[in-house]
Image: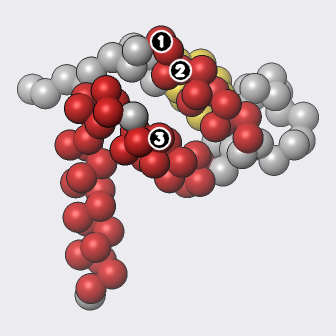
Amino acid sequence: METTPRLPDEHLAKAKELAAGQRSGKNCKLCYNRGYQGTDQNNMLVLCPKCVDTDTVGKQWREYVRDTPALTEMYGDYFDEDEEDTEDADES
């Protein structure tokens, strides 16, 4: 079974910044106005589904991973699969 690599702490701040930037601005009791509920076992943010545009944050995170060589090496394979699925859907 393949395991997801742990996100280095130095990139967690950028993830928090992206989540906070896409908040709807409402008072949220679910995430206490942070844009995320916490982190998972791989040090990845768990975004707030109530007040954050998760699709936009996902797209911004993919761009950040592509622009950061260390993250591309760790996670590039995961996003390559998503892009192929999207291209196949567009052609149909």
User: Against 63, is 47 above or below?
Assistant: above
Give the image location of residue 5, x and y in percent: 27, 21
Residue at 50%, 52% (x, y): give it.
59
Give the residue drawn at x 57%, y 30%. 15
Would residue 38 appear left or right of 59 to someone viewing this image?
right
Q: Nearer the viewer, mark 3 or mark 2?
A: 3
Distance of label 3 from label 2 (alpha carbons): 12 Å
Q: CA distance from mark 1 to mark 3?
A: 15 Å
Q: Please, what secondary structure does the residue beneath circle 1 have?
A: helix
Within 10 Å of the Cα at label 1, are there few (<14), some (14-19), or many (20+) other Cα atoms?
A: few
Residue 18 drawn at (x, y percent): 64, 37
| Residue under label 1 | 9
Front residue of this view, candidates 10 and 36: 10
14 lies above or below 67: above
* Residue 63 appears in the picture as rendered: yes
Residue at label 2?
12
> Would you say the residues marked 1 and 2 are in contact, meaning their CB atoms lie under 8 Å apart?
yes
In the rendered structure, find residue 38 and report the number of the disc placed on it.
none
User: Which of the image's four quarters has the N terminus?
Assistant: top left
- Mark 3 or mark 2: whose residue is earlier in sequence: 2
Q: Amino acid at mark 1?
A: Asp
Q: Image point 26% across, 87% down: which residue?
A: 92
Q: Which residue is mark 3?
A: 64
